[in-house]
Amino acid sequence: MNEEQRKAGSLDVIAQRNKKEKDYSQYFETVYQPPSLKEAKKRGKEDVQYNRDFQIDERFKEMGKGRTFFIKTFGCQMNAHDTEVMAGIFEALGYTLAEDILKADVILLNTCAIRENAENKVFSEIGNLKHLKRDRPDCLIGVCGCMSQEESVVNKILKSYQNVDMIFGTHNIHKLPEILEEAYMSKAMVIDVWSKEGDVIENLPKVRDDYFKAWVNIMYGCDKFCTYCIVPFTRGKERSRRPQDIIDEVRDLARQGYQEITLLGQNVNSYGKDLKDIEYDLGDLFEDISKIDIPRVRFTTSHPWDFTDHMIDVIAKGGNIVPHIHLPVQSGNDAVLKIMGRKYTRESYLDLVNRIKTAIPDVALTTDIIVGYPNETEEQFQETLSLYDEVEFEHAYTYLYSQRDGTPAARMKDNVEKEVKKDRLQRLNQKVGYYSERALKGYEGQVVTVLCEGSSKKDNEVLAGYTDKNKLVNFRGPKEVIGKLVDVKIDEAKQYSLNGTFLHVHEPSAVKA
Ligand code: SAH
Ligand code: SF4
Ligand code: F3S
């Protein structure tokens, strides 16, 4: 490296020059690969390769000796699980977990791009870490996760956040050792973002965050391309794991005593469609997993389009697949659904809900709704409200539409005032609150089975856990039941949770709510 290049690699020089120029590549010692949403949109025909040979190279094994790491996670369960994998890699490299973000030698922000406010939170966090980099220049700060897959974000970090040492995306977290090594060696920002998805990598190390509940990826990516959504760009094409790999992982978790698993995918109902050599779908996977001795199996997220009768049948049998279905509807109006690219109608959604309710009478249905889609009219919004009344969801996550660069919806003109959207959201939330409270009230006097997770956040003497339908229950009981399924009699419904009295440890054949 010559003097000129060395200077160009210094953060200050990059900062000055980036203000003037758009091509950043000359300031990097390694090849600078900007992420490209256009590239990310392409869906290749090549088969997914399954890599089972992941190993930490000998030369990296001492890298973390005497060093600590901290990962701050934003976004969905997918990110939470990626964080567990990255923590596994850090520990395999000899790092230990720092007790506090400000004391860590390596800080990673595992980011979410789903809405603007999610991104703003991350930028303010990076800003907060600026003084840390001044005080401890040797500490490494990395940005990974979905935001790293966006060109605009990478360019913004280059321009305004020179305290960041590395940026890498969602497809190459298994390359963390190499990325860290490069960041230690190089004075310039290390950027390694792959716009195209890689292989499915099995056998990655993991440090699970919980002793009783575990995430299990069943597939990666999303091919639905709902017109508002950034995920197909940040997570790549749909890739299913092989059934045997999933089953082996679940069996192993059962052996370790895990009580609950959540099968993860952006659209789990598409599971298996890309497995060309076998006919195997989510219903088949449910069946195989229901034979494993693990008390609770959750799954998220289900796109209403691909929900099959086979899946409904397996859940209806009352085995370990929980009767809680999160079924994002987004809108109750056909025209809005159409421009959202959701590929179902109000009628077909309601028909699916009917089939589910008929087969599984005690099912708990929850949903996601977007309010204020471009040009949404009051009448269209009213249809969302009326659909809510028809289905009587037990809960919903509601969002104001947020424009995402690169998505088709971002090109739509929008004639709805922000205040009007906010007012609609508030009205919808009132409805959500009404049905959530009503659902909780219905539990008063009943006995429910709770997976006791530990002490409640508010009171150390009170235990807390969730029912199979994801209702939070607080109760007094012996601390030995932490990590076990217990039966609790519900005394009182609060606004967001239930209070109850501990009865006994749950016997599988005993009453189940
Ligand atoms: N794969 C899941 C959704 C994952 S994103 C599914 O299709 O069901 C979680 C939720 O975020 C979505 O259901 C949607 O309600 C919301 N969301 C996604 N993109 C959004 C955007 N641009 N603005 C507002 N909300 C959005
Ligand atoms: Fe986004 Fe639609 Fe895929 Fe869900 S199904 S992740 S909303 S594109
Ligand atoms: Fe966010 Fe990426 Fe999940 S955008 S919601 S972290 S898949």
Image (tube, helix red, strand yellow):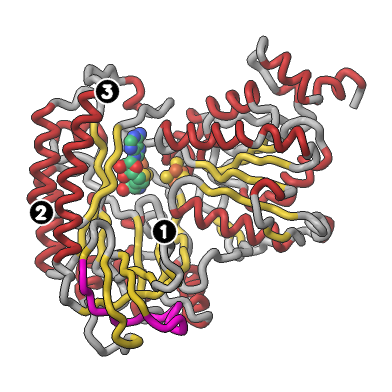
Q: Nearer the viewer, mark 1 or mark 3?
A: 3
Distance from the alpha carbon under mark 2 to that under mark 1: 25 Å
Q: How crowded is mark 1: few (under 14 residues within 10 Å), some or many (20 or more)?
A: many
Question: In the image, what residue type sits under mark 1?
Answer: Leu
Image quarter (top left, top right, bottom left or bottom right) of the N terminus = top right
Residue found 16% across the figure and 64% down from its top: 441
Distance from the alpha carbon under mark 2 to that under mark 3: 33 Å
The reply to whether the C-beta atoms of the residues labelled 2 and 3 are less than 8 Å apart is: no
Image x and y of residue 112, in percent: 48, 41
Kindly state the secondary structure of the residue where label 2 is placed. Answer: helix
> Which residue bears the numbered disc 3?
418
Q: Tell me if residue 490 is in the magenta stretch.
A: yes
> Which residue bears the numbered disc 1?
264
Quadrant in the rendering for residue 188:
top right
Answer with mark 2 or mark 1, whichever residue precedes in sequence. Answer: 1
Image x and y of residue 142, in percent: 66, 41
Q: How crowded is mark 3: few (under 14 residues within 10 Å), some or many (20 or more)?
A: few
Kindly state the secondary structure of the residue where label 1 is placed. Answer: strand
Answer with mark 1 or mark 3, whichever residue precedes in sequence. Answer: 1
The reply to whether the C-beta atoms of the residues labelled 1 and 3 are less than 8 Å apart is: no
Stretch in magenta: 477-492
Q: Is mark 1 within 8 Å of ligand 3?
A: no
Residue found 29% across the figure and 82% down from its top: 487
Quadrant in the rendering for residue 484:
bottom left
Question: In the image, what residue type sits under mark 3?
Answer: Lys
**In this picture, is 511 found above or below 339?**
below
> Which residue bears the numbered disc 2?
351
